[in-house]
Amino acid sequence: MAPGPHSPADLKRLAPVREIARRWRARTGGRSTRDPDRRTLLACSGGADSSALVLALASASPDLLVGHVVHDMRPPAEARADADAVADLARRVGLPHAEGAVHAREAGGNLEAQSRRLRYLRLEEMARQHRCRFIATAHHADDQLETLLMRLMRGAGPRGLIGVAPRRGAGVAGVAIVRPMLGVSRADAEEICAAAGWRWVLDPTNADPGRLRSALRERVIPVLQELAPGVERRASRSADLLRDAAGAVWDRADELVALGRPDLPAPIHEYRWTRVSLRGERALVLGEVFRTAYRLLHGEAGLDRRTGGLIDQTVRAVRSRGTDPKTFRWGPVRIDVTAHDVRATRNATEETHGDRDG
């Protein structure tokens, strides 16, 4: 570790370090799991947040791997400097290091979204190669507040307002994503780096005022923090509470989706309910029923383009006393509401952008 006011052992005295370690253990098996059985890849970009993640957990357990993915969102020289900084950090804290690369520009589509998707896939591959059951990322309370504000501005429902999940289930590689820094702030991350004497790298894209998240970070969040110090931690706590509330909605929606599943062999191309079985349900539950049916019939692709207005129209039709048949087109999935039945059907040959027929 570079000379600084705290040695690795001393870092454990910092409250944010203890909080990160506590949440990491809680999200990777709790007290019943030994540290060697929770081997984790620490995703590190070289910035203050992910450097703090490495510094905090390196002081808690030696059975970790520092992972970095080189991407083409930044000029090659800057990307290489970031990678070298991460490798240097891993050496200084005495942890093994792995590096991979992705090329988002070759994939087409939204460059930022493709880069993020490919980085996660590469991290999962690296974790599997190095026998890591978990990947830890450095999303913190400020990120959570920014996410909640962005989704509020978009008019999100309960699923959106739960924010960044503290744990995301294992993917095809059998690796779970955990986020042990959601209880600490960006300022806490910088404090950890400063205490360790570590100089993190800066990513100029994080300060691009043309990006909504960056604009919120530079122009809105500081005002909120001045008006209500600690607002980022309270927002993160609110997201946790909303996640519990949303869980009740999801559980009921799953029960209703199962009720509409036909007694037919896979693949399933239709869900059908009696209208009376759905009419008395809350609007939030019905919206989640139709989103879930969409995912099961078609997958996630295109679901984010199904607007709140379309969802509300579908739900109102189901709950109303009207008997005229209506058809709602959710891209490749159509939802038919008749006097007695509700059907969600996959129609792969029909991609309609209108909200409603009938």
Image (cartoon, rainbow, N blue to C red):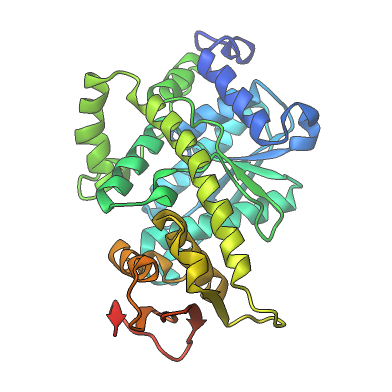
Where 38 sits versus 315, above or below? above
Q: In what quadrant of the picture does the C terminus appear? A: bottom left
Count of labels shown?
0
Residue at 36% over, 84% down? 325
Residue at 60% over, 28% down? 23
Where 122 sits versus 229, above or below? below
Residue 1 spot, x, y in % from top left: 58, 20
Residue most extreme to the bottom: 349
Q: Is residue 294 visible?
A: yes
Where 141 sits versus 107, above or below? above
On screen, residue 60 versus residue 248, left or right, reads right
In this view, the residue in front, 257 or 32, is 257
On screen, residue 37 versus residue 46, left or right, reads right
On screen, residue 134 versus residue 304, left or right, reads right
Residue 337 spot, x, y in % from top left: 41, 78
Q: Quadrant of residue 273?
A: bottom right
In this view, the residue in front, 146 or 101, is 146
In this view, the residue in front, 265 or 108, is 265
Residue at 27% over, 53% down? 154
Q: Can residue 300 be seen in this view?
A: no
On screen, residue 68 versus residue 103, left or right, reads right
Residue 324 spot, x, y in % from top left: 33, 83
Q: Quadrant of residue 354?
A: bottom left
Residue at 32% over, 64% down? 312
In this view, the residue in front, 31 or 59, is 31
Q: In which quarter of the image is residue 172?
A: bottom right
